[in-house]
């Protein structure tokens, strides 16, 4: 029997994802990572948002504490996380996010990572074809998380040279909302923030969040604040413009007179602040929307966190002394690593977006530098694509601005939260790729 054409076997949506996956170099990069001793020809990956600066300290703690009780081999307290863990996360985030109303366990649903949490938000708030606002540049995987399986429509917000985190932001979001609704006849149902921002590495000022809340109230749409980098805020010692803004959670703003509290939600997880992407543990926080909480419980089977991750996270967060020391040390290391990376690109005449004080990112204009070094390059050539190919040729991976919906070509995101020898190798390869 002749083999069937797979395009006839898979659903259209599955075939589309299959084709995209086959063309994505990430899977090859993950399996071929550089090591100076065992794999010197491998890829240096500074394109994926991972924090490796504190792995030794976290592993040392975990390997002396982990002793798994038998109940974590069962379904325990259900798909939304154990009662113990939800209580521990409440205590931990009440100390660090300073919510107006202290968090309570029934207001939290635990998921197997924040990507699952984002998918749940999309499923719960937007029917197929309805919109979710997302400011540019954005965390690229938001697109897949919000739209790939549940068919909501991401509505990119353009800022036309204005600061995406500045006072003009609300009117830009409103314009995008009205344009989408006029063009499609479908409603916008939510506004998604990444706060602190990925890839810009900055925090939204409190007054800007308030204006966005007012916008959401005006159109009765949900505000979802993804605060996965909430504790990865550090001191910028080398550039102060725009002035760094301290982090203030959306949950710390009193909604009275601003927004219906049922429309405000936040996300957090272990991946970034604790450098533990592999633990796969996220949380959806919705303090005032019982219908949303019940809906999440109903689908929690599909994002059931591992019992091992549940127990391990509770162990870590229960230890207030350890987490305090860990967060302080992590912030010092992030500050130092940012300074090294920013000074390195500055020393090579590469433009970057200054004023960072949060997360792991330096937003750099490699396209501009490439054109300076190669003035014969055609004005019509896509510099982002050209530089991306040069980087891959030299076995270094960065995330291209095109993946982040950048309004200008040639920008890239460098993830600087790596041990110094790894970061130095990455920066050397980036410079060589630009000069080649």
Image: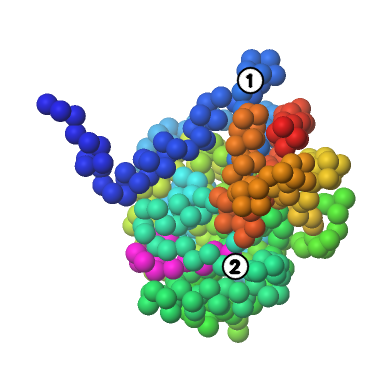
- Judge the density around disc 2: few (<14), some (14-19), many (≥20) Cα neighbours within 10 Å: many
| Few, some or many residues within 10 Å of mark 1 (<14, 14–19, 20+) | some
| Helix, strand or loop at mark 2 | loop
Q: Is residue 406 visible?
A: yes
Left or right of 264 on screen, residue 238: right
Tell me the number on the disc at residue 41: 1
Position in image of residue 79 (x %, y %): 39, 48
Query: Is residue 133 inside the magenta stretch?
Result: yes
Region in magenta: 122-135
146 sits left or right of 312 in the view: left
* Magenta-colored stretch includes residue 286: no
* Residue occupied by mark 2: 158
Considering depth in this image, is 63 or 198 the residue closer to the camera? 198
Q: Residue at x 51, y 34 (%)?
A: 25
Residue 174 drawn at (x, y percent): 56, 77
| Quadrant in the picture for residue 388 | top right
Q: Nearer the viewer, residue 154 or 321?
A: 154
Near-viewer residue (42 or 293): 42
């Amino acid at each position: 029997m002749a083999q069937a054409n797979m395009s006839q076997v898979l659903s259209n949506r599955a075939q589309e994802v299959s084709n995209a996956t086959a063309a994505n170099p990430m899977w090859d990069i993950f399996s071929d990572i550089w090591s100076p001793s065992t794999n010197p020809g491998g890829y240096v990956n500074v394109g994926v948002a991972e924090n490796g600066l504190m792995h030794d300290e976290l592993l040392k703690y975990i390997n002396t504490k982990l002793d798994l009780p038998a109940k974590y081999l069962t379904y325990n307290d259900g798909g939304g996380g154990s009662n113990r863990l939800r209580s521990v996360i409440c205590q931990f985030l009440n100390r660090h996010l300073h919510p107006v109303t202290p968090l309570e366990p029934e207001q939290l649903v635990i998921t197997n990572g924040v990507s699952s949490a984002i998918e749940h938000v999309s499923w719960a708030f937007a029917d197929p074809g309805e919109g979710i606002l997302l400011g540019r540049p954005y965390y690229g995987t938001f697109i897949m998380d919000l739209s790939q399986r549940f068919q909501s429509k991401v509505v990119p917000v353009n800022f036309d040279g204005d600061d995406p985190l500045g006072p003009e932001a609300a009117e830009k979001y409103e314009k995008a909302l009205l344009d989408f609704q006029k063009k499609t006849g479908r409603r916008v149902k939510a506004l998604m923030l990444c706060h602190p921002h990925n890839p810009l590495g900055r925090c939204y000022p409190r007054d800007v969040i308030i204006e966005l809340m007012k916008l959401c109230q005006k159109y009765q749409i949900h505000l979802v604040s993804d605060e996965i980098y909430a504790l990865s805020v550090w001191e910028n010692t080398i550039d102060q413009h725009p002035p760094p803004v301290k982090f203030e959670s959306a949950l710390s703003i009193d909604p009275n007179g601003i927004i219906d509290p049922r429309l405000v939600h936040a996300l957090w997880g272990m991946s970034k602040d604790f450098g533990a992407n592999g633990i796969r543990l996220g949380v959806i926080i919705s303090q005032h929307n019982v219908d949303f909480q019940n809906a999440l419980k109903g689908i929690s089977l599909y994002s059931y966190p591992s019992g091992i991750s549940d127990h391990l996270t509770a162990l870590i967060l229960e230890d207030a002394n350890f987490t305090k020391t860990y967060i302080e040390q992590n912030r010092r290391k992030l500050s130092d690593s940012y300074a090294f990376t920013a000074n390195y690109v500055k020393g090579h005449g590469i433009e970057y977006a200054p004023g960072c004080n949060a997360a792991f990112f330096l937003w750099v204009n490699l396209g501009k530098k490439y054109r300076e070094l190669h003035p014969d390059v055609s004005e019509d050539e896509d510099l982002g694509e050209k530089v991306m190919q040069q980087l891959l040729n030299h076995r270094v991976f960065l995330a291209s601005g095109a993946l982040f919906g950048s309004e200008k070509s040639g920008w890239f995101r460098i993830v600087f939260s790596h041990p110094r020898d790894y970061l130095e190798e990455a920066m050397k390869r980036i410079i060589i790729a630009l000069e080649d």
